[in-house]
Image (cartoon, helix red, strand yellow):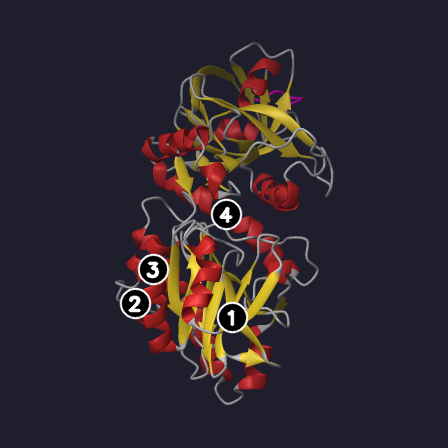
Amino acid sequence: MPYSVRKAVVDVRPSIASRHLLLGKSIASAMKGSSDRVYVFAGLSSSTMRIASYGADVGPNALVLNPGCAASLGLQSGDVVRILIKRNQIRIGPYVGILTAPIGRSTSPRRCYGKDTEYFRDVCAAGMHMGLVAYVFSYDAVDMSKGRVLGRVPEPQRYGRWHSREFPLPDVIFNRIPTRGQERSERARRLIEYAKKHNYMRLFNGGFMDKWTVYKQLSQHPDVKDMVPATAVFRGLSMLKSWLQRYRSVYLKPTNGSLGEGIVVVRLSSRGVACRYRNERKRPVSELLRNVEAVYARIKPMVTRRRYLIQPDLNLLTVDGMPFDVRLLMQRNSRGKWYRTKMFARVARRGEYTSNISRGGSGVPLDQLLVRIAPKKAQHVLQAVRRAGVTVAQAVESMSETPVGELGIDIGIDRALNLWLIEVNSKPHVDVVKPSTSERAREASVRRPMEFAIYLHKNAL
């Protein structure tokens, strides 16, 4: 017997006895044939409650609760929640927890999650609009023994305050822990491993990806391998020499880097060997040295501190002398299908060697650039990039041990109009404030993770 899905309006009344429910007429009609006792599931918690049918002062879609019961479920009067009804069961939600790191003590109550605050606010709002019980929580706010979470929900208006509530452990966890170091903390690892092993909890975007692991796996995937550039773990001076002899220009990238951080470019020229990188103060450095040995001596402290990869320079297309690549935000919807939510070209700032927006790069519609650069083949390349986004997302999903709900995929286009996979990011930055983001893309980018949460919850049931 399938579940009947309804929207219910929470009504909290002290007159209702503990562990009792008063149902509105519409909801009560869906419960016909069941006994006067019902199993109520909220996140990973469940309880047996006695139900009563509607009264004259109860709205048709009301779910009337005692204050203590409502508090234990993390609900308040006026909340509109999705409920699934089947015989003597009522399932609220699903409960979706957006997992992040602990907030600092000095954080503003309106900007408590830093640069992610407005994104989290909009994701919660999208979930609430669908009837989900959506909240943000940190891995240090979980009491596993009691199955309780101290989460936060935002006020409806933008830039409003956040309010703490206690919730049951969620049905679905959306992992948005912002840094690798935080994700490696003991409490975060313990919670993530618990979610992976639990029969009824679902976790998506299980963690940051290691670049080398991703390249190794995708280089063997039949649908993607032709897009993956030659890549190897960097082993030192002799490897740098041999790769420069073969490719003339190479990139060195940290396996666990992001936002273009730590990248080194080395090029042979008629006047010596050029290298570009950022120093310890994050300032760009460009040098021309006499030989490869001198370059390696200069970059050795950086590239031996952690694991690096080496790749050939892909000779990407440029616009007005500045290189660009393509960023795609790929997300899954309520049917588990991949959709392209955003696609734009990232043009490097003049003098920069990476196109990251955080390094001053700019976002430009890809079709506009392609019409300027390759007008006769613009549509062909545009369609190829769109197909590549779905193909790469499906390939990554097929290799992941946990469900993947969204990916940031960076694709380069070389001067022969071949496509190259530059990077896959499991936690792409989603800017919901930037004016250049269209309202349609902004709305979809926060709605689809909540749609995917519904999909995962449905499959778990």
Secondary structure that dominates the magenta span = loop
Q: Badge 2: how crowded within 10 Å, few (<14), some, or many (20+)? A: some
Sequence-wise first label, 2 or 1? 2
Q: Residue at x 55, y 16 (%)?
A: 69
Neighbours of disc 4 within 10 Å: few (<14), some (14-19), many (20+): many
Question: What stretch of residues is rendered in magenta?
Answer: 54-58
Count of numbered labels shown in the rendering: 4
Residue 430: percent from left, percent from top:
58, 53
For disc 4, the marked residue is: 449
Q: Which residue is mark 3?
A: 215
Is 393 rendered above or below residue 24?
A: below
| Label 1 vs 4, first from the N-terminus | 1
Give above or below for 422 relative to 211.
below
Q: In front: 50, or 121?
A: 121
| Closer to viewer: mark 4 or mark 2 | 2
Q: Are marks 4 and 2 in contact (CB under 8 Å)?
A: no
Identify the residue position indicated by label 1 in the image.
325
Q: Amino acid at mark 4?
A: Pro
Kindly identify the amino acid type of the residue bearing the numbered disc 3: Tyr
Badge 2 is on which residue?
223
User: Tag 4, which secondary structure?
Assistant: helix
Mark 2 to mark 1 CA distance (whole Å): 21 Å
Q: Nearer the viewer, residue 115 or 318?
A: 318
Disc 3 secondary structure class: helix
State the separation of the CA atoms marked 4 and 3.
26 Å
| Snapshot quadrant of residue 234 | bottom left
Front one among 171 and 132: 171
11 displayed left or right of 411: right
Magenta-colored stretch includes residue 57: yes
